[in-house]
Image (cartoon, rainbow, N blue to C red):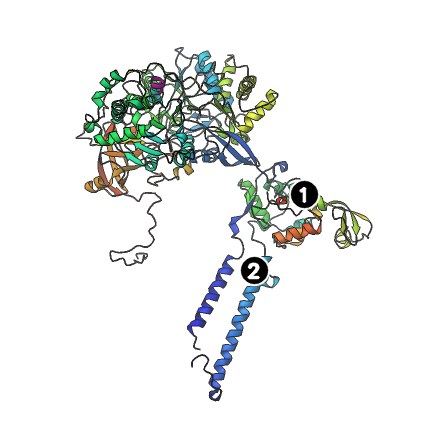
Amino acid sequence: MKISRRRFLKLFGGSVTAAAIFQACGIPERELIVQSPLEMPEDMVSGTDNWYATLSPGEAVSSGIVVRVMEGRAKKIEGNSDYPINQGKHNVVAESGLQGLYHPDRISSPRIRRGNRGEDKWDEISWTDALSRVSESMTNLKKSSGVVLVTEPLSSNLNLVVNKFVSKFNVKHVQYELIEKTNLRWAVKKVFKQDRIPDFDIENSDYVISFGADFLNTWNSPLRYSRGYSNFREQSTGSGRGTLIYVGSHLSLTAANADKWIYVIPGSEGILAYAISYVLLDKYESDVKVSDEKTWLKVLSQYAPSKVKELTGLSESEIEELAKGLVKHKRPLVLGGGSVGAYTNGMQNLEAIYMLNVLLGNVGQKGGVIFNPTPPILKGFPDHLSDYANFAHMRELGSSAKSGEVEILLLRGVNPVYGVPGFKTCLSEIPLIVSFSGIMDDSAMMADIILPENHYLEDWGSDIPNPGPGYPTIGFQQPVVRPFFEKRGIHLGTKSFPDVIMALAEIQNIDLGLNASNYENVLRNFVDELFKLKRGSIKANNSRDFWNGVLQRGGWWDVDDRVVNYELGSIPVPTKLASARFSGNVDTYPFYLVPFELGSLTDGRGAHLPWLQATPDPITTVTWATWIEINLNKAKELGIKEGDVIKVKSEYGEIEAFAYPHPGVSPDVLAIPIGQGHESGDRYSSARGANVLSILSPATDEESGAWAWASTRVSISLTGNNSPLSKFENIAPDLSVDEGGHIIKITSGE
Amino acid sequence: MLPGEFDRSKLTRGLMLKLGMLGIAGGIASLFVLVMLAFVLSAWFGRPLEIFSVFGFNEGPTQPIAFPHDVHVNKIGLDCTFCHRTVTEKPAASVPSVGLCMTCHKALGGDKEGVQQLRQYYSAGQPIDWIRVHRVPDHVRFVHEAHIRFFSGEKNVVNRITNSSTQITIENALKIDPNVREGETISVAASQVCSTCHGDVASMPKVKQIRPLKMADCVNCHRDNNAPTDCTTCHY
């Protein structure tokens, strides 16, 4: 039968609609699940959620979070809108706490090594057994000072407990952080005479120059700065949209957000800062504050823009432009950090950079540098020592370990086997290594006894953020769920680290003087003291209500207690800046190696969490890998395509990683992210990527002894291998076309 | 032949045949459209009409274990609240844990396929992921407890309800106790309320949704029973 076009289309449309309807009717079966848990006391099922406030420990600063808990299981993490640092914002690191809590490779009981170190063969032992072994070893020491405890920088009550422990047990305490803040702290102490890192009032500033500080992603307190940044751009206070300039050798997220990214020769950022200072003093004396102008000008004249052109790679007009920007805006602010503070002259660079704030007179002003007051009740636990140099202490530890002076090494919250190149070789002379890690990281792999600690969502704690928000803040951490391995009984499972310390003291019949039986009670004592102050954010009639209030809000702070005295006294006249020294000569090793942190993996501690591994780097969108950012033209010149496996060699070692040619990197720089290349025991971080730290020069800062991790030169060679990079961008072209623009059909190839 | 060009005098047999076929085809198409409309509209406003259950609509979803309510309730006599325990206290009625099922089935049930599957789940330490049958959207907060509380307890049996929180109609009362008479008081247990919205689950080998559970359904019942019909009753 003949059928007309109209008729055909009607029928066609009708049958397609019908097909769609038939397909779509009904909810897809897997969309909604109601689960029968294996065992559940009936009174726990409610279909309602509870939210608990606690802290998410960050690399630098903890953020306040609230955790949604249903039937005893943590379901979702959100930012705590009350907590002063992040005020409701949170990041991917905070979110991933859930994966850490329910990680399949969590260590569920104390372990003792079987076989050789690093073989990852363990026997489970009970807590009684494990603690008595450690206690016995501590009693049988040959040298009285042979025990070393390495922790991350501690604050508040944990610092108190550890301090008591180390003093009563005669233990040496080393505070270690991989990306150390040593130079920042020393520069702050020298320039601002402050023990605590100041708060930077980005939200009220209108012109920010950041020298290498990737404050939107990884530097210092990124949540707080990102929060401020949004207001900085909106400037609802009336002076118009703020301008951000970024000076540095890597196109970080902050650089990508900046109005201008200025690349200077690595190591010369301090020189640039002095050049800008010179222009300020020379051309804009009325706008700058300094008492001894003549001496300053004389000293800084060697850094006049005309003299530093070759050193920095910037023209005179560009330098003058920067200085002009600083004085033409009402509230300029200058920040420095990251790789700029990680050369051999890093501390001096930061000194020069932060000095600009003093010259501009923004210290203590809106939109400037705001000092943080000392939080109350710090007696007994000094924290975040302003003159501490972490890496120098680790080096010292390494050498004393090599010479057999360390008998017991206790590691908690740190991963030096990963982060300190060569540290692994120092371990062979240490008879006993104890790790408190809850996951089998690189350092735990080398331990003899593991005393796994609770995950932070299962633990009590308190933290004094440094930098604070400009007023005293003490964050409180509480368990939001029962310890996951509680089901293994009291002799197995995980325990809270400070509780273990206190248990060790009890075994040895030593009174730590804490007046508490466990860490929770230490915190209660502390909160009782806070209550007596009768000030701050929590109002209550008795200490019990006060305690509840503190836990409900997630902390205690006092917005009325601010620094009022901004008298800086005499400002030290700048001395000659040493030039940065790099390992390897420029002919054999033509590239500057710039390692950088990712917002997800940070210093490598996030590598065992798949959500963090799968979080794309904001600039390159690469996931689950280590890549080498190489200049596009340079790559073409060397015949390197994306995905090529490249060997990067320094004087100290070599690694292999994938090439990622891109235009936002200088031809003489290679930028490689930190965080992968673990020799660990968990399924997500082990045997993945490369550890760029392992090829870095061990050179240190001339002034502070901090590790100069940006002072390595490298060379590259091709291996001939190639593999597609796991990234999000450009992986799905809409349609593949040939040169004539014709659409190419993709077939199976057979 | 052009459309519209119909010349009576030229009406041949072939033409009549073609016209007839066109008419039949048109009729089938219209019928088809009507049926589709009936299906789509009935599904959108409520449930697909019963006549479509021939095609498999209206049946409940296939569950990981084919749990038969009819065996457990009608045959054995288990009460609804024996398993769905939090219905009188909490918003959600809750499904029982696997452990609860095993209190009987670790010994009972023989070699039935479903029981074997259950035992496998328990020994493997696996929770059972049931496919949800009854669901309201996320912006609706339904609290079981309030509804059970309202309909259960001591009720007077009446012909016509004047106070729905203390009275029950004779028809509904007869379902509970066939010997009850008007004017008497009857005690309604929590589990006797369930079928109001969930239907006769006791006889269902496979649970399916029998009421549309759209907003009109809820609001009508609220109105009939003098319950609050304010927006914030359910949307908050």
Image location (x, y in percent) of residue A578: 23, 20
Q: Which residue matches tag 2? A: B56
Quadrant holding the N terminus of chain A: bottom left
Residue A314 seen anywhere in this rendered image of the structure: no
Whole-angstrom CA distance, mark 1 to mark 2, is 34 Å
Q: Position of residue A398 (x, y in %)?
A: 33, 19
Quadrant that contains the C terminus of chain A: bottom left
| Magenta span of residues | A188-197
Structural crowding at the residue carrying mark 1, measured as other residues with C-alpha within 10 Å and reported as few (<14), some (14–19) or many (≥20): some
- Find residue B146 and name its label: 1
Report whether A445 appears left or right of B126: left
Name the mark nearer the viewer: 1 or 2. 1
Q: Is residue A91 above or below residue A523?
A: below
In the shown orientation, is residue B139 left or right of residue A198?
Answer: right
| Chain name for mark 1 | B
Q: Which mark is residue A116?
A: none
